[in-house]
């Protein structure tokens, strides 16, 4: 492999010497050098160079996902920090086209001036680029009502094999022309190209927003209450949190249900009564500014000092029992069948390996799967970050990877099955 | 041998000329390598099946594109499916010569009706060994020629795979066979307060498999999304007969989102035999309004006003005067025949908030020039409005012997512009065009009327349709909101996609179907030959 200085010189010739730098912080786990192209053509030239010289590259975003995925850094990390322009915000059409280096936080600051938002809410939106949002399919509590990146992405541009700049979809909210490249890119973790531009549907911010939260003596009772709520009223989000998470969020020391709902004045008044009746006497209701602040804490929740974190996704009705069997702390998107789970202490690499294997088995029983989202470097060996797709599906995935990345340069070796 | 002979007799002059027209550019086009693979596939089975009875006949030098159905193959299929599992008579095959896109017609040589996944897999393995192309078919309600057989002698219909397999209310999932009719899913779960949200106008007939292939929409997709937002998993039989389980009951993908790639692939990735769908909680209540306008311009401005106000109704549908009158003549739904246009606006959700939303919408549409806003007073009145809307296409049959429906999309704010453009196109080509469409999504459905016995008018209808699509693209829109590209809009694909985009899409398709035997000659045009291919084919078909 080429030395960092040599890589810096070669890629500096494409993006300008001032735009090649050393990795900062956990970027170092993801890439040897970082190149910051200024436009899609420069991204394509980077791809061309990497294909010609068999150099591995990966789009970085904030590098937090990549640093967890990769056991060895790629040679060239591509940061789109300079590609952060809004190409077109069409408030009346409720669509936005923006470069992939723009952060979700910055986009939503702009959207808020129109009473709108891109309703995807991973933790710390100021650190999540639109490219990463799509590539890693990040989501959060409001996926229950608004869906995930695959539901909101209506157009995409990416630099792919042969330095081709490809686009799929368009800027209209309903479009079936051509194969759905948006779906192929969403959740591809940078393994088939570098996303340079994204077009999303945006949605109106609800007129009123309210949170109702209740603590329960145990998780089963909390999940049962959540199910009754989900069946009775339309909610914006429905989170069930374990005792430790409830405590960290300031909801007391017991498992809790944190339900968000909104609408116009009449709707909210009606919902408060209905939700209150279901959650019972201990139900605490906060509204508007106070609720928005509480929602921010909920969205940004990041288990402090966790040794091992994972995302489990199962059939929604199985989530409660899966979490009970996993014996973990969690923040669960009840209704979506998805939860972030974690343990604070890990004794040894073997302990971690066995824990992940046990969680996977439980996820499979729940007709789903598990992805490790945070793992200490010392525990990485022998732990697969991604679950294994069934053989026939995986055969197709391998063909897809080969078709889109025949030289094997895009974030190689760390996706499902080592793709 | 009699059977084989009679099948070959079905190859009409029309079919033969299509084969020629399609074959020439393909071999010379960018997928020259696929032609090589196709040949390799077709010569795997060697030996004279007619003599040894194996059915593995050589394809010979005169092998037509798409392969040949011979007596040996027919015998094997008959053993598997029985006589009632296949259709070979020319008169019966006429039923399958087109879908809702009637400008082009071509019968398959044989229609197969498998009962389950195993049979689909066995059929596709047989076809794979012989290099024979096939077309999947649901109910044939498509509107872009998606199941028109073009150099594909075998049609595989999912109509006998029509079982709802499992409903999981707690997880809000339902697993169905692909031949299940769309509306039957909702009918099966509505007693428990659930619906299957995508509701194409053809929902009383169209199948889930067809919906998956076309990524179908419907009026209520404005709020609830299209098919791809509601499909979590599929069982896909690949063109080589292998069975792949993609996705499942969990919301997150494990690896690439292949379900997302298959939905909307228009039958070019294989045959979907099962699907796992999301169920949606039925809304607590509705307010359904009929807003009446003097002209189309004001109606479209009202749509923009509603969207711009940040209100997302469940549906906003528009009908212009021509359609209103046709619907009234057919169904007597009480629509005002003197109106220039009407909007059907439906708000749904929590009962407590509906009146307030309805009040705001009413104010907005009055502000945009509505001369009257009627509120459906009960469920019966609401259903009459929806019946009028969903059966509008049927009513158009009263206006002309034939019609072609377009499916372009524009950014919602450009609706007034596209409708003005359509009026211009109508007068320039001297064809009548009616409009009934999903206004809230910017998804237009201009209905171009013509008489197929009048060749000149037919050509003018085709040209008018093309001009409308070009106008959509010029306004930042797309060729199709929900009907699919099929054969209808293939020639226009280069208007919105570069050769590189189309090449990558072809690479994606070939991940599933390396020989391109699943519904060949659809979606992606062969570069440099689109017009040459489509025009004569259309002439042949007329």
Image (cartoon, coloured by chain):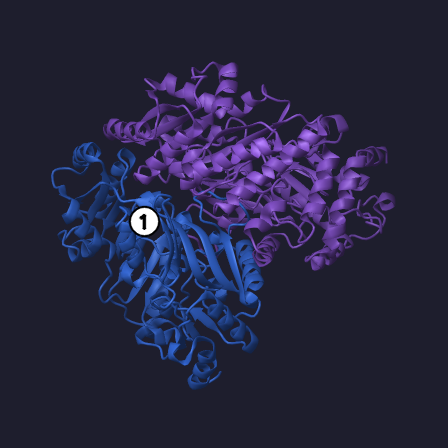
Q: Quadrant of residue A207?
A: top left
Residue A267 at x, y percent in the picture: 22, 33
Q: Is B428 left, or right, of A183 in this rendering? A: right
Q: Residues within 10 Å of mark 1 (few under 14, many from 20)?
A: many
Q: Chain of mark 1?
A: A
Q: Residue at x 47, y 62 (%)?
A: A416
> In the rendered image, which quarter contains the N terminus of chain B?
top right
The colour with which the image depicts chain A is blue
Query: Is residue B536 left or right of A354 when viewed as pictured?
Result: right
Check disc 1 and report its element: helix, strand or loop: loop
Residue drawn at x 36%, y 32% is B302
Image point (80%, 34%), residue name: B12
Q: Is residue A350 found left or right of B405 in the rendered image? A: left
Residue situated in front as seen by the camera: B224 or A255: B224
**Along the line of sight, the residue nearer the viewer: A341 or B13:** B13
Q: Percent x, y for residue A220?
A: 24, 45
Instruction: Give the purple chain's letter.
Output: B
- Residue A361, image x, y percentages: 40, 56
- Residue annotated with mark 1: A119
**Residue B251 appears in the figure:** no
- On the image, which quarter does residue B504 sit in? bottom right
Q: Is residue B523 above or below residue B288?
A: below
**Residue ranking furthest to the right:** B51
Vertical position of residue A196 compared to residue B178: above or below: below
């Amino acid at each position: 492999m080429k030395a960092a200085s040599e890589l810096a010189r070669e890629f500096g010739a494409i993006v300008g010497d001032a735009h090649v730098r050393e990795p900062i912080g956990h970027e170092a786990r993801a890439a040897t050098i970082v190149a910051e192209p200024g436009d899609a053509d420069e991204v394509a030239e980077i791809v061309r160079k990497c294909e010609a010289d068999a150099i591995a590259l990966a789009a970085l975003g904030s590098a937090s996902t990549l640093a967890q995925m990769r056991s060895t850094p790629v040679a060239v990390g591509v940061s789109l920090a300079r590609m952060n322009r809004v190409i077109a915000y069409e408030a009346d059409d409720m669509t936005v086209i923006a470069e992939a280096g723009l952060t979700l936080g910055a986009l939503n600051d702009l959207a808020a001036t129109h009473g709108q938002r891109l309703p995807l809410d991973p933790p710390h939106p100021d650190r999540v680029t639109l490219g990463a949002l799509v590539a890693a399919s990040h989501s959060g509590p409001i996926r229950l009502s608004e869906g995930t990146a695959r539901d909101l992405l209506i157009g995409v541009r990416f630099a792919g094999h042969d330095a081709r700049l490809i686009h799929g979809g368009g800027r209209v909210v309903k479009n079936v022309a051509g194969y759905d490249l948006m779906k192929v890119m969403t959740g591809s973790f940078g393994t088939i190209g570098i996303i340079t531009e994204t077009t999303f549907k945006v949605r109106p911010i609800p007129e009123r927003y309210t949170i109702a939260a209740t603590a329960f003596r145990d998780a089963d009772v909390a999940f049962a209450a959540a199910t009754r709520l989900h069946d009775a009223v339309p909610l914006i989000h429905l989170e069930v949190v374990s005792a430790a998470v409830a405590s960290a969020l300031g909801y007391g020391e017991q498992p809790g249900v944190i339900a968000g709902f909104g609408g116009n004045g009449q709707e909210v008044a009606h919902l408060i009564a209905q939700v209150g009746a279901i959650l019972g006497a201990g139900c605490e209701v906060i509204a508007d500014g106070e609720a928005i602040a509480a929602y921010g804490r909920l969205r940004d929740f990041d288990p402090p000092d966790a040794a091992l974190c994972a995302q489990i996704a199962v059939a929604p009705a199985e989530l409660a029992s899966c979490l009970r069997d996993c014996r973990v702390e969690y923040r669960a998107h009840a209704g979506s069948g998805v939860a972030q789970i974690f343990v604070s202490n890990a004794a040894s690499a073997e302990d971690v390996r066995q824990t992940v294997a046990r969680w996977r088995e439980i996820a499979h029983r729940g007709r789903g799967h598990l992805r490790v989202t945070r793992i200490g470097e010392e525990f990485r060996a022998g732990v697969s970050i991604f679950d294994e797709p069934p053989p026939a599906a995986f055969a197709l995935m391998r063909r897809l990877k080969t078709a889109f990345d025949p030289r094997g340069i895009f974030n190689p070796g760390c996706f499902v099955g080592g793709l | 041998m009699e059977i084989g002979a009679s099948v070959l007799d079905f190859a009409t002059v029309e079919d033969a000329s299509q084969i020629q027209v399609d074959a020439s550019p393909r071999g010379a086009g960018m997928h020259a390598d696929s032609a090589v693979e196709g040949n390799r596939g077709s010569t795997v089975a060697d030996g004279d099946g007619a003599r040894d009875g194996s059915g593995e006949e050589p394809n010979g030098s005169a092998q037509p594109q798409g392969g040949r159905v011979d007596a040996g193959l027919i015998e094997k299929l008959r053993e598997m499916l029985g006589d009632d599992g296949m259709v070979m008579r020319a008169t019966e095959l006429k039923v399958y010569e087109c879908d809702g896109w009637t400008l082009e017609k071509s019968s398959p040589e044989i229609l197969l009706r498998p009962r389950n996944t195993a049979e689909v897999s066995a059929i596709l393995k047989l076809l794979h060994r012989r290099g024979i192309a096939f077309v999947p078919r649901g109910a044939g309600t498509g509107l872009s020629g998606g199941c028109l057989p073009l150099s594909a002698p075998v049609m595989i219909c999912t109509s006998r795979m029509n079982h709802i397999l499992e409903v999981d209310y707690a997880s809000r999932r339902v697993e169905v066979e692909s031949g299940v009719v769309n509306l039957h899913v909702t009918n099966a779960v509505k007693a428990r307060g659930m619906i299957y949200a995508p509701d194409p106008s053809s929902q009383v007939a169209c199948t889930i498999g067809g919906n998956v292939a076309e990524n179908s929409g419907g009026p209520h997709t404005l709020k609830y999304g299209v098919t791809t937002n509601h499909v979590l998993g599929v069982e896909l039989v690949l063109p080589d007969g292998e069975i792949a389980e993609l996705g499942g009951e969990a919301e997150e993908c494990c690896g690439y989102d292949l379900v997302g790639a298959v939905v909307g692939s228009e039958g070019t990735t294989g045959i979907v035999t099962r699907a796992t769908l999301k169920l949606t909680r039925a809304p607590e209540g509705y307010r359904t309004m009929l807003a009446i306008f003097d002209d189309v311009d004001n109606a479209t401005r009202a749509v923009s006003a509603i969207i711009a106000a940040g209100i997302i109704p469940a549906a906003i549908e528009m009908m212009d005067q021509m359609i209103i009158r046709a619907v009234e003549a057919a169904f007597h739904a009480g629509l005002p025949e003197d109106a220039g246009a009407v909007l059907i606006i439906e708000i749904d959700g929590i009962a407590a908030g509906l009146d307030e939303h309805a009040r705001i919408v009413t104010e907005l549409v009055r502000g945009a020039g509505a001369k009257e806003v009627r509120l459906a007073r009960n469920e019966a009145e609401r259903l009459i409005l929806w019946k009028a809307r969903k059966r509008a296409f049927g009513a158009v049959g009263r206006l002309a012997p034939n019609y072609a429906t377009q499916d372009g999309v524009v950014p919602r704010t450009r609706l007034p512009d596209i409708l003005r453009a359509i009026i211009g196109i109508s007068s320039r080509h001297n064809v009548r065009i009616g409009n009934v469409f999903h206004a809230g999504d910017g998804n237009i459905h201009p209905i171009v009327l013509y008489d197929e016995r009048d060749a000149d008018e037919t050509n003018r209808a085709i040209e008018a349709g093309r001009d409308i699509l070009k106008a959509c693209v010029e306004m930042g829109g797309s060729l199709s909101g929900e009907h699919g590209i099929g054969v209808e809009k293939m020639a226009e694909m280069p208007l919105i996609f570069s050769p590189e985009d189309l090449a990558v899409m072809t690479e994606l398709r070939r991940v599933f179907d390396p020989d391109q035997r699943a519904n060949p000659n659809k979606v992606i045009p062969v570069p440099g030959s689109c017009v040459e291919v489509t025009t004569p084919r259309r002439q042949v078909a007329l």
